[in-house]
Image (spheres, grey):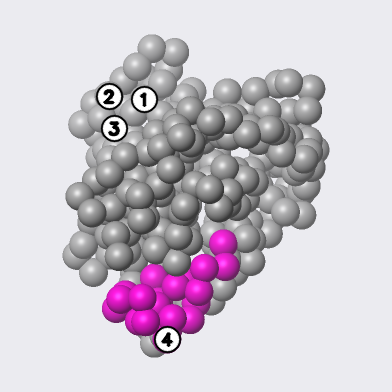
Amino acid sequence: MAAQVKYDDVEPGQEIPARTFAVDRANLVMYAGASGDFNPIHWRESHAKAVGLPDVIAHGMYTMAQGGRFVTDWAGDPGAVLDYGVRFSSPVVVPDEGGATLEISGKVEEKLDGNRVVVALTARSEGQKVLTRAKAVVRLA
Amino acid sequence: MALNRDFIGRSFPPSEPYEVSRVKIREFADAIGDPNPIYRDPEAAKAAGHPDVIAPPTFPIVVTLGDPALVDPALGLNYAMIVHGEQRFEYTRPLRAGDVITTTTTITDIKAIGGNEKITVETVVETTGGEPICRTFNTIVERGA
């Protein structure tokens, strides 16, 4: 696959510059429709609060997708992602007004054979880690 | 509520075939706010070495949600109390427009974590021709009442 980043140009410990992604209720409505996950905790505030959440929360998979985008934009080709896994450690709370912000950064954790690297991701919202053990294996050029 | 441990190791029959379309990939890419042309433009995808537009790495959630493994009442899963614990995708090759795929699910583990129940489901995604695309690992936590 046509990854843009060259394996020989990266070293373990190398940082991938942080990016921020805005999350609005409209994003969650679109994600519900596209994914088929219509759980009302992602779009109905009264329901979210009734089940003990502070407000509407983003789909975990929406947050995971932003981490995926962070990796695929860095690699240059989404097809270069061989493995991608996360643990959802804390919800991303999305208020009606102003929405939420996701801050994602990454680091090349390890170089493997076959031009593969392990990228470790950090994702935070409102200072909370929202993903842990977030790692992707990417085949570089 | 304790989940039925008899379900550990149980596999379910393959799903009905699902045809991956350019339109659905674009809709999903729009929904995650990702403007990457490799999800939209067949020429851009070809330039990157793919036969057609490919799907974002998390796209298979579209075909693995609503898994038959989780809706069997005998399992005892309370949908009102579940949260997504972990998710992983392990690829053999990218999923792309034109693929006709099936999903085959196995419940690999059920265990208690504190007052919660944790269930792990593995799904094999392959073409109807038997070509492997990816395996997905999905862990769901049912919060204790």
Q: Tag 2: Cα neighbours inside 10 Å, few (<14), some, or many (≥20)?
A: some
Question: Tag 1, which secondary structure?
Answer: strand
From this viewpoint, is residue B48 visible?
A: no
* Residue A25, image x, y percentages: 48, 77
Q: CA distance from mark 4 to mark 1?
A: 44 Å
Residue A107, compared with residue A11, is above or below; it is: below
Q: Is residue A95 left or right of residue B6?
A: left
Q: Which residue is mark 1?
A: A117
Q: Is residue A7 one of those drawn in magenta? A: no
Could you tell me which chain the residue with mark 2 belongs to? A
* Residue B120, image x, y percentages: 42, 39
Could you tell me which chain the residue with mark 3 belongs to? A
Q: CA distance from mark 1 to mark 3?
A: 7 Å
Q: Which residue is mark 4?
A: A46
Q: Are marks 1 and 3 in contact (CB under 8 Å)?
A: yes
Q: Which residue is mark 3?
A: A108
From this viewpoint, is residue A33 visible?
A: yes
Q: CA distance from mark 3 to mark 2?
A: 6 Å
Q: Which residue is mark 2?
A: A110
Q: State which tag comes first along the sequence, 2 or 1.
A: 2
- Range covered by the magenta-colored residues: A37-57
Q: Tag 4: Cα neighbours inside 10 Å, few (<14), some, or many (≥20)?
A: few
Q: Are marks 1 and 3 on the same chain?
A: yes
Q: Are marks 3 and 2 in contact (CB under 8 Å)?
A: yes
Q: Amino acid at mark 3?
A: Val
Residue B27, compared with residue A47, is above or below; it is: above
